[in-house]
Amino acid sequence: MTTTSMARKRRPRIGQAVLYAVLVSLAVVYVFPFLVQIATSFKPDAEAAANAVSLWPQTWTFAAYERLFTRSDFPLWFANSAVVTVAVTAGRVFFASLAGYALARLKFRGRGLVFALIVAVMAVPSVVLLIPKFLVLNQLGIYDSYAGMILPLLVDAAGVFIMKGFFESVPVSVEEQARIDGAGTFRVFWSVVLPMARPALVTIVILSFQGSWNELSHFIVSTQSPELTTLTKGVASLASGQLSQGTQYPVKLAAAAIMTIPVAVLFFVFQKHIMNTSEGAVKG
Amino acid sequence: MALKAPGRRARREDARAGWLFTLPVIAVLGLFLLVPVLMALWVSFSDWTGRGSPLAPGVGFVGFDNYAAITSGGGLAERNFGIALRNNAWYVLLVVPLQTGLSLLLAVLVNRAVLRGRGLFRTAFYFPSVTSSVAITVLWLFLFSTSGAVNQVLGWIGLNGPNWFNDPRGIVHVALGGGNGPAFLTGSDFLGVTWWDWLSGPSVAMSALVLMAVFTTSGTFMLLFLAALQNIGPELDEAGRMDGATAWQRFWRITLPQLRPALFTVLTLGLIGCWQVFDQIYTGTQGGPGKTTVTPAYLSYEAAFTDQAWGQGAAISFVLFAIIVVFTVFQRWALRERDTSKRVARRLAKEARA
């Protein structure tokens, strides 16, 4: 074996080692904050302030969690977030697939116009809508109610867009067979088309769940009563210190950790689907 | 006849079902998007103070007064708007290139076919993207507190970290060693903010938020780049390798040009997202310290909901809307497919096939 061929053989191995070193250090940077968060939520206040880096509490305490669950509105916030998220996710899945199917398959006058409207709407940045949404909710008399929290989130244009794209990529033959057999349009949609659309529906579920669970600004402008506070709004008020004195990092970090659990579970359950980049699951 | 009838009936059924199926979407988008925008447009031209309905007869039309107040006249409203634009412009200027570069780097690293445990790495990089902006802001406030984890780690390598979220100094000013700046920059101003202050750079507090944005978005954009990378065939790369191009050259001349559509998507989404910073400010800094983390989105909220200056708040959000549209259009124009690059790609493809 000549020296050059040996060098050529060794170089990839060195390159490989460098690659791993870079990746591992990057991964540490990405994961470390969350480990610190969990560790700190089990520390007493004083230790959290004095030793902010350690991943192992010197004194273990569940005080932060106990306080959140027994002496704060945290359980109520959690329940509100759950109610809204379930309603919004169910609504978005149903309405987005319904409209996506119509726009992809059914021929009707005005279809192009409806689609143009949806695309135009997608371009409107949501932050610009803070004041406008409050104005309309107030005008309609549903400000500070579950209806005002849920209805405006019930449809998202991007979901319709995704579903339309999906239905266009599916061959029509199966539906045509069902139609020839005399099934009505809704029947065909409900019992033939929807079951086939599982992958796209999963995408919508993930996007809707994550979107509505993590939503903050809409709840700021649609509610004011403490009974309607969601997790995002409640934890934001904890963070800005409105409800407590001192820094109280363990309580805040515990609250932030618990509110991350549902989306984290969703992520790990559908990880394959989300990470399957070849199918473009996260597009849109 | 007997054959025609069902066809026509089916067509009618299609039309009916089509409208019925899209009706909920049209109703919700119309009621909670179109109507609100029109109402807010009216409010931005009115003197409504938040009492009763803005459509009530007592509310007056004031023309462009609200827009004038935030862009001229030398008042507090103008200065606040100028500061918000300054803060957000620096945020965009830093976050967009950093998040794009980092996510591309992550995608290229993770895309190595030989890599072991790449699922694990992908998960690690993507995880911050699923968390809510509120949860991550709470975490960031802790990590970047005065004796927080970041400053402790900086201490290990002998650095004295700043007092992150309490430090209003612009980082460009800090790098220049403080001081007051030359007279030709401090003497004149734009939107009530002196040119010296426009050039201050993001405050130290805002820089912590910049890092947070990069941390939370790079995973999502990594996935977009990964999808694009996996759609690229290995032929061109191999052709380049045959011709003796180094890995570095192959990346810049062969891989990157083919990622143009993904790059366009990432830059556009990044730009649009960066001009909409709100949650982080509301949760973390409420615009402080010294107004250096106020963004137009937060300013419009504060003007309307806290100061009851609804007309000005609405005017700010429409100006913000215009900024986002202008930037998106400009970017589309700047990154348009040029004929030459297409030609080169085609030639390369032909050579690769030959």
Image: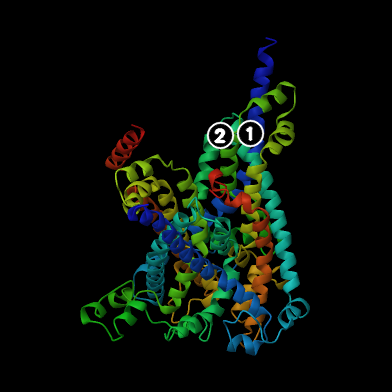
Relative placement, left or right, of A43 versus A17 is right
| Three-letter amino acid code at the position of disc 2 | Arg
Relative placement, left or right, of B7 versus A5 is right
Q: Which residue: 70% across, 23% down?
A: A177
- Asked if one can make out residue B20 in the rendered structure from this viewpoint, the answer is yes
Residue B320, how many percent across, how many down?
43, 61
Is B139 placed above or below A165 here? below
Q: Nearer the viewer, residue A104 or B75?
A: A104
Q: Which residue: 40% across, 60% down?
A: B101
Q: Secondary structure at mark 1?
A: helix
Q: Which residue: 29% across, 47% down?
A: B244
Residue A98, how many percent across, how many down?
66, 40
Task: Give the distance between the C-alpha atoms of the residues marked 2 and 1, in whole angstroms.
Answer: 8 Å
Q: Residue furthest top?
A: B1
Report in which chain the residue with disc 2 lies: A
Q: Quadrant of residue A56?
A: bottom right
Label of residue B18 in the image: 1
| Three-letter amino acid code at the position of disc 1 | Gly
Q: Which residue: 37% across, 79% down?
A: B170
Instruction: Verify CB contact (< 8 Å) between mark 2 and mark 1.
Output: yes
Report in which chain the residue with disc 1 lies: B
Is B205 placed above or below A149 here? below
Quadrant into which the N terminus of chain B falls: top right
Q: Which residue is mark 2?
A: A111
Quadrant into which the C terminus of chain B falls: top left
Q: Nearer the viewer, residue B110 or A8?
A: A8
